[in-house]
Image: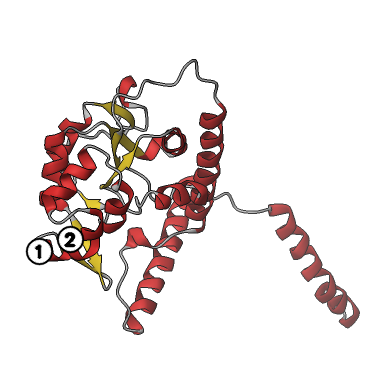
Amino acid sequence: MSEEEAKVMAVEEPKVMAVEEANKGLDYIPEVILKKRKNRDELAFIRKKQLELGNFGKKKKKVADIKRPEDFVLEFRAKEIDLIRMKQRVKRPRASPPPVKSNLVFIIRIQGKNDMHPKTKKVLNSMQLRSTFTGVFAKATDGLFQKLLKVQPYVTYGYPNGKSVKDLIFKKGYTIIEGNPVPLTDNNIIEQALGEHGIFCIEDIVNEIARVGDHFREVMRFLGPLKLNKPEAGVLHGKKQVFSDGGDTGNREDKINDLIIKMN
C-alpha cells in the first residue's frame, strides 16, 4: 500500500465509522429499567436533602415531608378545584333555606390541609377554626350559614343541647391571657373579664351561651376555640359528602350532640 493510499484510508475510515454509528440509532431501553432509574434518582434526591438538613443541625424531615415537583402541581390543582367548587355551592339555586331549629350552632372543623384554597382558609380562620378538630359556638344567622356553605367540605355543625354546652365548657373551655391558654378554673378571671356584663362564673358562661344571650359575642371573644379529641376510627369516614347523604360534613342538626360526646 502506497503512502497516498494510507492517507486516504486514514481520512475515510472515521467517516465510515461515524455513518455506521448514526445508522445504529439509540439503543432500546425497557420501560422497567427507566422506572427503576427514576425511582433511584428520586431516592438520591431525597437522601441528599436529608443529609443537608442533618449537616446544618436542623430537625430532620421524614421522607414523606419532602415534596417533589409533581406534589406542588397536584397541590395547586387541588386548591383551584376547591375554589371552583366553593363558587358553585354558593351560586347553586336552593329551593328553600333549611328551617333553623335553634339560635345556637356548634361548628367542628373535621378536614382540610394543603388542598384548601386561600379563600377557603380565610373563611375558616374568620370563624377561629384554624386547625382540624377544633370547635366553636356561633349564633345562627343567614351570614353564618352562607359562610358554612363556602367551607362545607371541611366542617360539620348542628344544634347543641344544654348538656353538650355545659360538658364542652367545663371540660374544654379556656381563655387566652398574655398569649397563653388558661383553663376556666378560677372565677376571678371570669369576673375581671366579663363582670361588667353580669357574668361572674363558669356557670354564667354556660347559661349565656346556651340561651344565646345579649352578651354572647363578648363571651365568645373571651373564650378560645375548643380543642376536641380526635374521634376513634369509624366515627368519621373522611368523606366530603354531606351528612344527609352518608358523608361527614354539613348540617347534622341534633345529631351533632352524638359527635360531641365522642370528641369531648
Way the structure is coloured: secondary structure
The residue wearing badge 1 is 186
Q: As shown in the figure, which amino acid type bears the numbered disc 2?
A: Ile
Q: As shown in the figure, which amino acid type bears the numbered disc 1?
A: Asp
Is 29 left, or right, of 64 in this rendering?
right
**Marks 1 and 2, how far apart at CA:** 7 Å
Q: Nearer the viewer, residue 149 or 199?
A: 199
Q: Does 206 sit above or below residue 13?
A: above
> Measuring 15% from the left and 35% from the top, which residue is drawn there?
162
Q: Nearer the viewer, residue 147 or 33?
A: 147
**Could you tell me if the residues under marks 1 and 2 are in contact, i.e. CB atoms within 8 Å?**
yes
Categorize mark 1 by other alpha carbons within 10 Å: few (<14), some (14-19), many (20+).
few
> Measuring 37% from the left and 46% from the top, which residue is drawn there?
112
The x, y position of residue 85, in whole percent, is: 52, 34
The residue wearing badge 2 is 190
Tell me if residue 214 can be seen.
Answer: yes
Q: Does 44 sit above or below residue 170?
A: below
> Measuring 18% from the left and 34% from the top, which residue is drawn there?
259
The x, y position of residue 264, in whole percent, is: 13, 44
Which residue is outermost to the right?
4
Q: Nearer the viewer, residue 258 or 102?
A: 102
> Measuring 31% from the left and 56% from the top, which residue is drawn there?
221
